Amino acid sequence: MFGRLLRGAAAVLPLALLLPAACGQAPVQESVQMPEMARTEILVLGMIHDGHQESELWGIEQVQESIRRINPDVVITEIPPDRLPGVLALWEREQRVEDDRVLLFPEYVEGLLPLSHEMDFVIEPGAGWHQMMADYRKMRVEAFHNKVAFAGQKKAYDKAEAWVAAWNAAHPLTVAEDDPLYLHSQQYDRRTKGELGPYDHFLNDVIGRPGGWTYVNEEHYVLIEEALRKHPGKRILITFGAGHKYWFLEQFKNLPEVDILEVRPYLPGGEDWELDLHQRGVEEVYAGLDDLEIWRSIMRGDALFAWDRLEARLDMPAAEKEALLESWRVQKGMNESEFLGRLWLGEPEVVWNIPLGGLIVTMEVQWALQSADKADTLRVGLRPDNSYPGGFAWLFAEIPTPPQHD
């Protein structure tokens, strides 16, 4: 039918357009400029679930006020897709929640759902959780801790957990754990990822799909990505337990069509929030190390993108750059684990170096399971330059080589 319509239309076109060469000139064709698509904006807000009811810093009122400031078009929730329609229908009729899973999340029952009458946003499901998965995960975790077949792995897991606890004790927090500005910092994400490292490393495959830590985050992310595709060009707020936050942010780095917005200016106490040059330099080092650690873990699907980001940061002579990249290539695959291949960072020291024309960031570091007496030092030179990822060009990067693990 479409072909017949085209042939009919061609029959009535002027001869000069059908035979331009015979008329001595080509027809004028106007170029059609496609409208520029609006970019999708993503903000990730970390929740502390029942902790909101007790926290004076990150309570329900503070969560609501932050959502008002963000003013999202869409809110992706830690609610499964098979439960959300019923939750929304009952709320619309009677302004109450009876779903046993959602009742665990006061940020929705007392925070987001009441806001839905005040603000204009769409609520989407983002949780891959279901009861069968939760029951199976519980059974597998109990087996890991109690069955003789897992005794060797359990011993290694306990050793790793004890090491993490000792490291945390030697590096205590200087801020309140429920401070929202801390909960949404790269420091929190690094610490949380490290603390969850033993669980992910030793139990992810023991639990299996979809209940293991990496596996369940993959299930969540599939739903989140569906919602992002459904609402292109919108401002999208993702509300999940704060421990999941680092995992999602790492994936979003690989989406070229989105902008990841800094959430801290929208938080309580964040009205005048702004990092100074030294603080931005430290966060840039954190971001670069995250990419290096992702790339070293060859099981991760985003390793190629992490490598591209690492290479894009470097500003040094070609031979020096290639030598540094080659040293990192050689180390790839030594650990095959984001826990064992992870640098644990001490308090950063930052100085402005006049000859360098930039910052030198120095940190004491340990690799996972490494004794404190074997701690090493990391040094990175940064020149402020917004043409580079993160706003800095890396002039040198002295990063200790990871140890070999069995």
Image (spheres, rainbow, N blue to C red):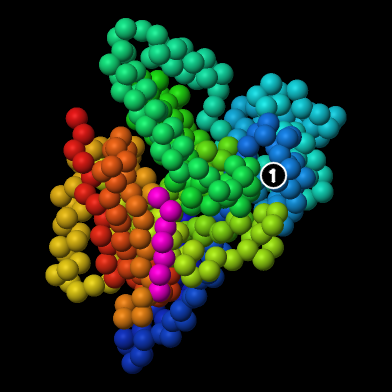
Residue assigned mark 1: 58
Q: Residue 149 at what x, y percent from top left?
A: 30, 9
Q: Which residues are magenta?
A: 346-352
Q: Left or right of 78: which side holds 14?
A: left
Name the residue at 49% across, 63% down: 279
Q: Residue 380 at what x, y percent from top left?
A: 32, 63
Q: Secondary structure at mark 1?
A: loop
Q: Residue 125 at what x, y percent from top left?
A: 61, 36
Name the residue at 28% across, 16% down: 152
Name the residue at 45% across, 43% down: 171
Instruction: Classify 122 as above or below 394.
Output: above
Name the residue at 35% across, 90% down: 25
Given residues 89 and 310, the one toward you in this image is 310
Given residues 24 and 176, the one toward you in this image is 176
- Can residue 387 be seen by looking at this rendering? no
What amino acid is found at the position of numbered circle 1 in the picture?
Trp
Q: Left or right of 263: which side holds 250?
A: left
- Can residue 271 be seen by looking at this rendering? yes
Given residues 226 and 323, the one toward you in this image is 323
Image quadrant holding the C terminus, namely: top left
Residue placed farthest to the bottom in the image? 24
Q: Residue 7 at what x, y percent from top left?
A: 43, 64
Q: Is residue 350 magenta?
A: yes
